Image (spheres, rainbow, N blue to C red):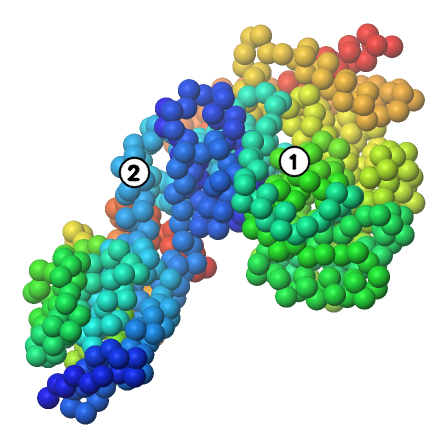
Amino acid sequence: MKILVISLLRLGDFVQTVPVLQALRTQFPVRRLDVLTHEPARALQPMIPDVNRWWTIDRDGLQEGLGRADIPLLASFSVLREKLDEINAQNYDCIINLTQTHYSAWIAGYLRTHNRAGLFFDARGQMHVHSPWFQYLDEHAPLSVKDVFHYTDIFFYGSGLKGPERHWNMHETDEGRREVAALKLGDGEKIVLQTLTSDTKKNWADTSWLKCIRQIQLFRPQAQFVLLGAPSEQRKIEKLVIEAQKQGVKAQEAILSLEGAFSLLKSSQLLITGDTSIKHLANATAIPIIELSIGSSDFRRTGVYKAGSLIVQSSVDCAPCPHSSPCSQTTHKCAKQLSPDLVSTLAHQSLAGNPFALRELAREYSSEARILQTRMTANGYWIACGLHDQAPEALVEKMVERSTWKFLLNREYMDPLAQFGSEGLYLKQELDDVLPRQAFSEVARHLDFLESEASKLAEETMKQLTSVRLRSPRLTEEGLADIGGLRRAQAQLERFSSQAQIKVKLIRSLKSQLMEKT
Amino acid sequence: MIEIIEAKNGSAVLRKEGRLLASAIDPQAEARDWINRRPALLGQVKSVFVLGAGSGYHISELYFQTNATVVVVERDRDLILKVRELQKFDSERIHFQCVNAAKELRASDIVRSAVRESFLVLQHAPSIAHDVDFFNECQAQLLGRDWGHLNWQWQLKGHPALETYPRIDTPDEPLTIYDLEATELVQDSAERERMIIKALRELVK
């Protein structure tokens, strides 16, 4: 089987697909696994062993070709078509588009195959998704949607993969080791700071970084601070390092390729970052991570995907903001409100391995920021739970909701042997890990409420569905019905009905687990 | 009249009617700079049209730095002979196209074959200074930024003529991807090519 995976966004978005690539290799009889991505992602090639061939598109070049009047109008068109025709000549058995943009959907549509997953347009401009997971992604795209699966989970299930295992199969390279050896960092505790991102809205101010580093040094006088950056960021990083050194901090710049950055992360003790690419590279290492979720950084969709990592986000109404638009505030509120005191103490307590202190810290700073800890649930999805403000009712509701969606989108509920019992058991295990014992009576009460709501909904949607099914043939015959509209309404009702029924079953399963344990 | 003179670095350069056709100091370095100012797609196109034979150093540099077929457009047959003699080009990847008028390009097999695939057009400024109008017409022919030339190129690629919508506001402005998007091909057909135009259109939104 020959599979092509398309990922046509930024570098960080590509790194997020690594567990999908690995699982495609192990769960399907894959003879060849190729990727189509943008040119910058090629820098990852030596580190990702699961990919056979890297097809790349020079997005900047195509844009330049379209924008300059001294370049033939058809130059970008011809270059892109020749590349896509070359890909078409490979006769892929399956093409999976892990990019939710119109640009990628037109490209995915042009490529020929028998099996598809993900967004694509046909020649008439009709949009198709070929998996309920990508439909879900489309429906849950607005930032106003509060609870949503992580993109890695959506890509994983949307590609037809199964199970809770996610492997970040990335290899360290000799080149990366050489780059790090050249830094002569020594064997002591190393704290890596990625102070710059590709989007200024996601950056924390230099003054905040400097204050944070000084304070961590007070807690951990032996620590060495490594300021990581790409070659294009060298001047800014150097300036920050000079300033830190003036203030008596043991700071050193590390201007590295992605291979070098990966080796550095493998040999360091803590990463503090707001950058997506580095954060996801770190998922493939053992390094603990503190993610600063600033500006358009949306941890719910693209947060650090490793159990036990910490995410800090200011408690401001406008966060996260849209990627494409500038900051809507008069000051960079979400970055300013994130205090260096909080981040430095968090870093220290994280290195000290003190969960109680972390919770206390989350409580103390709750008015200005949220601190969340990531979990990989046995149910097979990523979640981030507030360390202080995790209300038991909200948590149980969120997890039941997620499992319901998973059963619905994976069509597991259609299987007569659907594993509702196991799912309930896993849900119970997660609650045991996250919630204190005394919270379980509240959980049980809330489950009763959720069950009654879901049962009512199941009953109501079933009635409506029966009514639509009975009426639609007659309305159609009389020429009174918009057939497309009726079909859509029926499909929507069927989904609501299935969703409510799944939820009822899951809640009952969880309740029986709770009763068994008590 | 074309003369050969010696540049400061010892290389031979051509002078036509008193004007140098390459640097009299270091023509190779000048050719490298010329390539370095190249558009981004240069490494990806199948052919490159070079307007003006100059002293041939820029052609040589282009040949070594890319895998593209190089088509040199020049009106002066003697100059072509001198450049060939000077640079000793023997590769099948380098073609000289001698035409008296830009419209003759349409009849050339080499040009037609290059236009069918991806290509760029690079100007050699010292050569162009000798024959500005001729080279400007050749450039317009090859850029395809007006309907007539665009249609010629489009049909060479094997497609039916583009049915266009009239441009009322800016009829003399060079065509862009927005104009291509406004053709009947993209608006009203199911041709697969429209998908590529649509994808490119997303890049400039």
Graded by Cα atoms within 10 Å as few (under 14), some (14 to 19) or many (20 or more), the crowding at tag 2 reads: some
Up-down relation of residue A296 to residue A377 (above or below): below
- Look at 89% across and 42% down and name the residue there: A361
Mark positioned earlier in the residue sequence (1 or 2): 2
Chain name for mark 2: A
Q: Nearer the viewer, residue A319 or A229?
A: A229
Q: Nearer the viewer, residue A178 or A156?
A: A178
Q: Is residue B33 visible?
A: yes
Q: Is residue A122 left or right of residue A299?
A: left
Q: Is residue B80 visible?
A: no
Quarter of the picture holding the N terminus of chain A: top left
Graded by Cα atoms within 10 Å as few (under 14), some (14 to 19) or many (20 or more), the crowding at tag 1 reads: many
Q: Is residue A106 left or right of residue A176?
A: left
Using the numbered discs, state the Cα–Cα distance from disc 1 to disc 2 in whole angstroms: 36 Å
Q: Nearer the viewer, residue A397 or A287?
A: A287
Q: Badge 1 is on which residue?
A: A285
Q: Is residue A237 left or right of residue B16?
A: right
Q: Badge 2 is on which residue?
A: A88
Kind of residue at disc 2: Asn
Chain name for mark 1: A
- Look at 78% across and 11% down and name the residue there: A513
Element class at badge 2:
helix
Give me the disc on residue A515: none
**To which quarter of the image does residue A300 belong?**
top right
Q: Position of residue A479 (x, y in %)?
A: 38, 32
Q: Nearer the viewer, residue A322 or A112?
A: A112
**To which quarter of the image does residue B47 belong?**
bottom left
